[in-house]
Image (cartoon, rainbow, N blue to C red):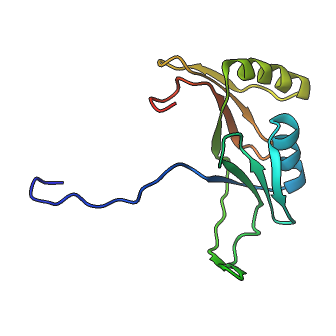
Amino acid sequence: MTTTEAPRRTARIEGVLETALYVADLDRATAFYQGVLGLGRLFGDDRLVALDAGRPGSVLLLFRRGTTLETVRMPGGTIPPHDGHGPVHVAFAVSETALAEATEVFGEAGIAVEGRTAWPRGGRSLYVRDPDGHLVELATPGLWPTY
């Protein structure tokens, strides 16, 4: 922006409400996120499962891959098509205590920890793969200036 341009208005974002992952086997993915990570189920049908992602208003959506390629028409409006391919990354906020406990939980479940990071601000992360190969990060405070 130059000094002669007026500032542009921007949308006012209050946070990320939903994160979506696209999975091959909805039951298998749901079992991982509920059974290993302890996320509570909010809604489910044959194409998607919505899970409580641990913070107020934060939802993880698991879509069966390929079931969102058509516009969804509902009495209140429409949802445009969307989909995703390949492994993606999702991070969950955890306490130091929960991070230590998660390491034990993953070991008991036979899930390999692929990586660990100690961040310059003091946060720590560990990384595992879900059944579809998505990279799942658990991170403690100190990762970002905002967390």
In this rendered view, identify the residue nearer to me: 32 or 128.
Answer: 32
Q: Is 83 rendered above or below residue 102?
A: below
Give the residue at x 52% y 20%: 119
Side (left or right) of 55 relative to 113: left
In this rendered view, identify the residue nearer to me: 121 or 68.
Answer: 121
Residue 43: image quadrant is bottom right
Q: Is 46 rendered above or below residue 28?
A: below
Give the residue at x 13% y 54%: 2
Give the residue at x 75% y 25%: 113
Q: Is 109 rendered above or below residue 70?
A: above
Side (left or right) of 30 relative to 20: right
The image shows residue 116 at horizontal and vertical percentages of: 65, 21
The image shows residue 141 at horizontal and vertical percentages of: 57, 25
The image shows residue 105 at horizontal and vertical percentages of: 85, 25
In this rendered view, identify the residue nearer to me: 16 or 85.
Answer: 16
The image shows residue 92 at horizontal and vertical percentages of: 66, 36
Which image quarter is the N terminus in?
A: bottom left
The single residue placed furthest to the front in the displayed view is 56
